[in-house]
Amino acid sequence: MRMYITVILRCLLYVSLALMVYDYVRIEMYFEMMGRGYIEGFSVYISTWRGHLLGIIAILLTVFNVIDYVIMKKKKHAKMKEYILSEYDVTDERAVEITGKAVRYAFVFILFYTFLLLGSYMFIPNYFLDYPWYPIFTTASIPVFGLIIYLITFKYFHAK
């Protein structure tokens, strides 16, 4: 359960940051269009829920990691380097091996997915004014999908 919470919170952190950055880019795009003379003026509504969402998720992730850190420190034989990935117990040799496999699968996926995304960016200059969200959300999807692949493969190998 600890792994699900950590991975979901990390994915939500990237998504909420992408939402917040999208608002900023959208407003900057309007300023740039106005500066170049394409539009005479504009009005936007800036919602604060995206920033609040990012803050709440960051606080939840921090609290969860602090609780996990305190639990880890209470173990008599725990070392600080064991806390780097809080999703699994480092003293469990099977979990260490499974994590290594899951990380390899996630890394291979990230390499191929990033290659495809970078290729798709060739088409962005023509559509940037119409689709400013595309590079933001596709870039944010790289770690999100990597974490999801990590979670799925970890659970798959753990169930074997």
Image (cartoon, helix red, strand yellow):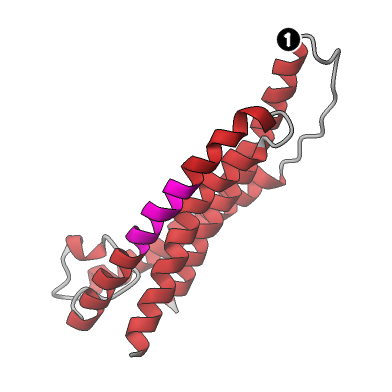
Q: What residue did someone put label 1 on?
A: 36
Pick the front one: 54 or 70: 54
Residue pushed farthest left?
Answer: 77
Give percent across and percent down for residue 41: 85, 16
Q: Quadrant of the N terminus?
A: bottom left
Q: Which residue is rendered at x = 42% and y = 71% of the image?
A: 151
Evaluate whether residue 143 shows in this view. yes
Pick the front one: 115 or 57: 115
Q: Picture quarter containing residue 92?
A: bottom left
Q: Which residue is rendered at x = 58% and y = 53% of the image?
A: 56
Q: Which residue is rendered at x = 43% and y = 60% of the image?
A: 146
Give percent across and percent down for residue 33: 74, 17
State yes or no: residue 115 in magenta. yes
Pick the front one: 103 or 42: 103
Range covered by the magenta-colored residues: 106-116
Evaluate whether residue 128 shows in this view. no
Q: Picture quarter containing residue 158?
A: bottom left
Q: Main secondary structure of the magenta part?
A: helix
Q: Is residue 15 left or right of residue 127?
A: left
Q: Picture quarter containing residue 30?
A: top right
State yes or no: residue 139 in magenta. no
Q: Quadrant of the C terminus?
A: bottom left
Give percent across and percent down for residue 101: 27, 72
Q: Residues within 10 Å of mark 1 (few under 14, many from 20)?
A: few
Give percent across and percent down for residue 122: 54, 34
Q: Is residue 145 above or below residue 132?
A: below
Q: Secondary structure at mark 1?
A: loop
